[in-house]
Image: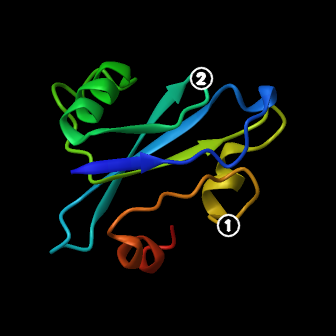
Amino acid sequence: EMIRIYERERHKRYATGTLVVATANFCAEKVQDMSFRVHEEMTLMKPMADLCWYYAQKVENPSVKGVIPITHVRLVYMSDDEDEDQIYNKPKAAGHDKLYDDRNDFISNSGW
């Protein structure tokens, strides 16, 4: 299974952002968000296992161990003057990248 992250725009002021990883069992309604810091602009297309390993190495929360079961990924870029809470509360705010995969219906219905 492949997962793709497309950059909304390439710009130096977005060199640091928040990567929001949502893990979900699609038979359930709960979605858990975990935040990571990224220090590069990315366009990724890798096997799921490679992505799980890659992001597991970048996890900030020390209580999260091992491989993270990534279901889909959203990459959110912020400039220094933007408020993180404001961005999370406004999913369509400027600065959000969009994820395109086979689960677009789920993502749309979840407010992504």
Residue at 33% across, 70% down: 103
Residue at 59% across, 23% down: 40
Question: Could you tell me which secondary element the residue under label 2 belongs to?
Answer: loop
Q: Residues within 10 Å of mark 2 (few under 14, many from 20)?
A: few
Is 60 rendered above or below residue 11?
above
Is 107 rendered above or below residue 11?
below
Q: Earlier in the sequence, mark 1 or mark 2?
A: 2
Residue 100 place in picture, x, y as percent: 46, 62
Q: Quadrant of residue 14?
A: top right
Is 74 rendered above or below residue 108?
above
Circles 1 and 2, Cβ within 8 Å, touching? The answer is no
Residue located beneath label 2 in the image: 40
Residue 11 place in picture, x, y as percent: 78, 33
Residue at 67% across, 66% down: 92
Question: Could you tell me which secondary element the residue under label 1 belongs to?
Answer: loop
Q: Is residue 18 left or right of residue 44?
A: right
The mark closer to the camera, 1 or 2, is: 2
Q: Quadrant of residue 41?
A: top right
Q: Residues within 10 Å of mark 1 (few under 14, many from 20)?
A: few
Residue 53 place in picture, x, y as percent: 23, 26
| Labelled disc at residue 92 | 1
Q: Nearer the viewer, residue 31 or 92?
A: 92
Amino acid type, residue under disc 1 in the picture: Lys
Q: Is residue 92 left or right of residue 29?
A: right
Amino acid type, residue under disc 2 in the picture: Glu
- Marks 1/2: CA–CA distance: 22 Å
Q: Nearer the viewer, residue 67 or 12?
A: 12
Q: Nearer the viewer, residue 71 or 59?
A: 71
| Labelled disc at residue 73 | none
Residue at 67% across, 49% down: 8
